[in-house]
Amino acid sequence: MSANPKTNYRNTENMTDFEAQVLADLSVLKNQMTALVGDGNSGRVGSLEQRVTQHEERFQSARGFAMAIGGLLTLVQFLVDFLRRK
């Protein structure tokens, strides 16, 4: 095969049904990938990344709150035990 693009070029009139189907499928795949990934950060993947980040932030906040409540309950328990022993 020669490396000259003009001799390797096939226009759509000379395309076989298989080649036309492959190009059509490739076009559909390209459109689906654009919808999935988007132009930078606007696709579904970017949206999922944002949602995961928000979830992680909320989880960390809830975890910190639970630890604070646990510490407070521990102090209350120590106080109750201390007052019972007197």
Image: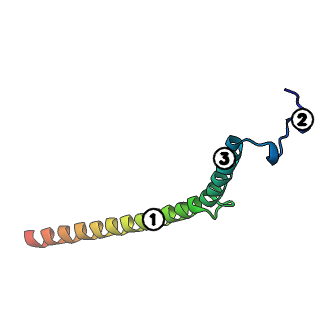
- Residue 82 lies in quadrant: bottom left
Inspect the image, locate mark 3, and give the three-letter code of the amino acid beneath it: Gln
Residue in front for this viewpoint, 83 or 52: 52
Say which residue label 1 marks. 55
Residue for point 46% across, 62% down: 56
Say which residue label 3 marks. 21
**Neighbours of disc 3 within 10 Å: few (<14), some (14-19), many (20+):** few
Give the x, y percent position of residue 7.
89, 35
Quadrant (top left, top right, bottom left, bottom right) of the N terminus: top right
Residue in front for this viewpoint, 16 or 47: 16
Label 1: which secondary element: helix
Inspect the image, locate mark 1, and give the three-letter code of the amino acid beneath it: His
Label 2: which secondary element: helix
Seen in the picture, residue 82 relative to 35 is either above or below; the reply is below
Marks 2 and 3, how far apart at CA = 22 Å
Residue for point 37% across, 64% down: 63
Say which residue label 2 marks. 7
Seen in the picture, residue 72 relative to 52 is either above or below; the reply is below
Label 3: which secondary element: helix
